[in-house]
Amino acid sequence: MKIVCVGRNYLAHIAELDRELPVEPLFFMKPSSALLLPGEPFVYPEFSQEIHFETELVIRICQSGRCIKESLARNHYDAITVGIDFTARDLQRQCIAKGQPWEIAKSFDQSAPLGTFRPMSGLPNPGDIAFGMKLNGQWAQQGHSRDMIFGFDRIVAHVSRFVTLEAGDCIFTGTPQGVGKVHPGDRLELFLEGQAVGDFLVK
């Protein structure tokens, strides 16, 4: 099982981090040990003082494929949820400043909490999916899939040019604006189309 993460997929988020606009989907990967299953707490790591949440739609691959055509990509994913791409922002800044890879800032254990998956077929409007996250009962991030620079099909087709996608793989599709810090004691609630799909505590 692989965790693929797309970066810089919402214009407002690119602006808030002062990054360049991508011409094709940018992606990196997290190991399976990054997965945080529903109901488990996120343990704040000792190596960072600035863990940021990034709330994202996550699609689940149901049919394996390589070099998938964009026109056929919809056949390869069947479910969706909301997840958090936790980022050690202080470590990421240090790595970028030194021109080093920044996996340590993105791929650490428990850095990919996932909500409960829902069938894509049950969505009222698959072309405009609302999602968000409440931090301690207040909205911290809200977004819509219509605002993505690269849609699900484009992402699946692009990633599969380089990496074979297998059934069970998860693709985090990017975060909208509003990323921010978490602290021990915080509670995060994940929402898809107004319905709660997960919640967990930071310890």
Image: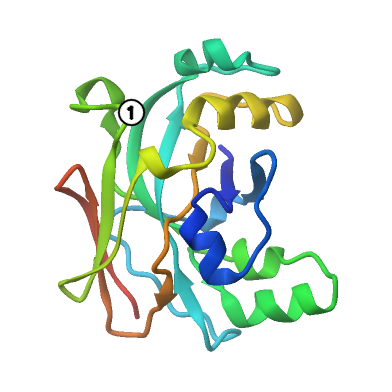
Instruction: Say what amino acid the circle numbered 1 marks.
Output: Gly
Q: In percent of the image, x 33 and y 48: which residue is there?
A: 82
Q: Residue furthest right?
A: 99
Q: In percent of the image, x 66 and y 29: which residue is there?
A: 158
Can you tell which quarter of the image residue 136 is in?
Answer: bottom left
Q: Which residue is mark 1?
A: 127
The spot of residue 130 in percent (x, y) is: 26, 44
Q: Nearer the viewer, residue 100 or 129?
A: 129
Question: Mark 1, residues whose alpha carbon is within 10 Å: few (<14), some, or many (≥20)?
Answer: few
The spot of residue 46 in percent (x, y) is: 55, 86
Q: In percent of the image, x 70 and y 17: which residue is there?
A: 67
Secondary structure, mark 1, is: loop
The answer to whether 132 appears left or right of 6 in the picture is left
The spot of residue 124 in percent (x, y) is: 18, 27
Q: Nearer the viewer, residue 84 or 146?
A: 146
Q: Is residue 3 above or below residue 30?
A: above
- Colouring scheme, one of rainbow, by chain, secondary structure, one colour: rainbow
- Screen quadrant of the C terminus: bottom left
Can you tell which quarter of the image residue 18 is in?
Answer: bottom right
The spot of residue 24 in percent (x, y) is: 68, 38
- Screen quadrant of the N terminus: top right
